[in-house]
Amino acid sequence: MFKTQPQSTLDSSRDDLAVQIQHLNYFFGVGDLSKQVLFDISLELPKGQIVILTGPSGSGKTTLLTLAGALRRLQDGSLRVLGKELVGLGDRALVNVRRNIGFIFQAHNLFESLTASQNVEMAVELTGKFASKREQSVTMLSALGLADRVDYKPKSLSGGQKQRVAIARALVNHPKLILADEPTAALDKKSGRDVVTYLHNLSRQEGCTVLMVTHDNRILDVADRIINLVDGRLESDSTPNDFVQHKTQEALTEVSADMFIM
Amino acid sequence: MARVSVAWSNLMHERTRLIVAIAGVSFAVVLIFMNLGFMGALISTATNFYEQFNAELFLISPETLEISTSTAFPRERIYQVAGVDGVERIMPLYSEYLLWRNPETGVSRGIFVYGINPNDPVFLMPELQGTEARRILSRPDTAFIDRLSRPEFGPQEIGTTTEADRRRITIGGTYFLGGGFAADGTLIMSDQNFIRYLEPRPLSLINVGLVKLKLGVSPEKVAATMRALLPADVNVYTKAGIIEHDSAYWLESTSIGFIFSMGVVVSFIVGAVIVYQILFTDIRDHLPEYATMKAMGYRSQYLFKIVLQEAIFLAVLGYIPGLAAALGLYHLTATATAGTLPVAMNGGRVIFVLGLTLLMCSLSGLISVRKAVTADPAEIF
Ligand SMILES: Nc1ncnc2c1ncn2[C@@H]1O[C@H](COP(=O)(O)OP(=O)(O)O)[C@@H](O)[C@H]1O
Ligand SMILES: [Mg+2]
């Protein structure tokens, strides 16, 4: 079976980009009930960058992440992930794209019935490397500080440890792109910080791109870049320092404006 | 290294649920086995007397429904096949109902009578073998009575004298045969006595023609030769064939077949529903994990396989104790009914029920798997 890919007339794909989004619109529902949640998004994520996506709740961050992760079909605009155009792809082709992406969720979603290592091995099995899967899994868990926990079931692990197992599962196949949605939300301050530090170090070693949604102001410093999404539109795109300064200024002007009215 | 068996681990993880599931499957398996066992036993009691017939081939009229509802046919027919290659001996068998009076209560009751030539070794019961038995059988107004006849027929002691169709009769001997579904009791008497009690019945019309074959001769082959020789007023059956013929009649004409088949169907559904409940709950509890697997790049068919594997595991894990329990209950039933309900296991049934169990669990698996397959990886963020 041969499928002809819709050939983009404006083929401006670039090798140095992990994610390239052009004029992306996204709607939930169909017909009268259809509701647009993303408006004309254009965004480029160079390889190796750690990008934090922030914004108020309901602004479309998760939706954008699931689209970039090939978890939803999409029809409009252009979305290239690791050199592959996702717009117009069928379910089978989307599954193949997913295998090159590491996902980290707010909930760890580990199989309670499997040990830490087995949970990670499930990811390795997708690559067919059955002979080395245990070794790969143990190496990755050790890199995350879980060398002495490989054969524990999730029940006997702390929240932070479980999240690290989930990260090991996402990273064990060395994906070139990692998508994380509030990975620290369920963790206490210390474990949250640890998890992000591990993620940061691994990204630097492996040279992979990280797109992470977070509300957690304490971890903004690991980012190379911070993108703010409001009501489905890109509001700002800046470095952590600018972002923080901007936020403070905003707060100041709000205060002075209030004073002025009084 | 082998694949991580998600199916096995998931089942083993929830012990209580696993035990409930296994108990549910076992329960259904036992119910199915008991229904089939009772059906088989009842049908075999309807026909097991044939085992005591000393013949390989049986000639009956096409109008004969079962042994006690038979249409007589000309004795000529067995003489016609007497010369066929492989035939050792041909023997006529007469049968009819007679009113037997209980000498103690005076109440008469229909008893099933076999009439035989005393010199023919028609039956295999040890009590009927030997010259002494032949001599007693040849006495006038004498018959052997079945020890398995209902007690309502009265005393079965040798020498007891009573009346059959208003004519004196003496019990000359006893044997163990059983009358199947039709007869409450049986008698065996000589053909000469038979025509005396059942006047005006001629000996030229017989009810069953028995053919004893030489050793090592194939009954099927001889039967085929005979069928080509004989006119349409008589059919030839092997022993297995006539048992099948009578069983089919009893299955159809009584509600035995229907009742126990319904029992099997209901047990099957009960088992399927239990397994469905268990698998469905299991899938629902693991939905985020299944969705995560899809996000990682596993295809729906892999989840499909996991659920189906769980179903197969449950089938096998439930079948084994179910089979063991059924064997115990078969033994118990056979003992408790003192062998009158010969519930017994056979290889065909072991395989058949295993197949049924696998089908039951796979069906439940297929119905419940839809939920796992529709797990949407986009919904877990
Ligand atoms: N499956 C869905 N069907 C319909 N609307 C949805 C669905 N998922 C999210 N939405 C809507 O889309 C908008 C963006 O949601 P989301 O991407 O989850 O925002 P965020 O992650 O920034 O909080 C919200 O208004 C939400 O109600
Ligand atoms: Mg969200």
Image: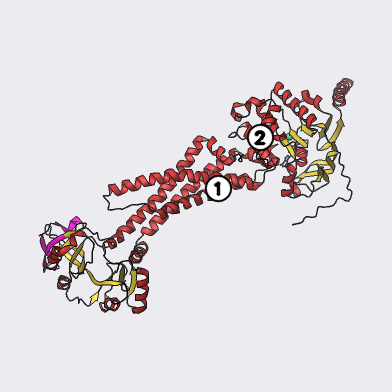
Tell me: A231 left or right of A129.
Answer: right
Residue in the foreground of this view, choosing between B58 and A188? B58
**Residue A102 image point, x, y percent:** 73, 36
The lab-note entry on whether marks 2 and 1 share a chain reads no
Q: Quadrant of the N terminus of chain B?
A: top right
Q: CA distance from mark 2 to mark 1?
A: 27 Å
Question: Which residues are drawn in magenta?
Answer: B150-173
Quarter of the image holding residue B377? top right
Q: Which residue is drawn at the image coordinates 59% and 44% (left, top)?
A: B306
A18 with respect to B290 (left or right): right
- Is B100 rendered above or below residue A123? below
Q: Quadrant of the C terminus of chain B?
A: top right
Question: What chain does badge 1 belong to?
Answer: B
Q: Which residue is mark 1?
A: B365
Relative image position of residue A57 (x, y in whole percent): 75, 32
Q: Amino acid at mark 2?
A: Val
User: Around disc 2, counting alpha carbons within 10 Å, would you say few (fewer than 14), some (14 to 19), or many (20 or more)?
Assistant: many
Residue that numbered label 2 is attached to: A120
Query: Of helix, strand and loop, which one carries label 1?
Result: helix
Which label was assigned to residue B171? none
* Residue B263 in view in this figure: no
Quadrant of the rendered image containing residue B126: bottom left
Q: Nearer the viewer, residue B72 or A151?
A: A151
In the rendered structure, the residue with mark 2 lies on which chain?
A
Q: Amino acid at mark 1?
A: Gly
**Does the magenta-highlighted stretch encompass residue A253?**
no
A126, B321: nearer the viewer: A126
Q: Quadrant of ligand 2?
A: top right
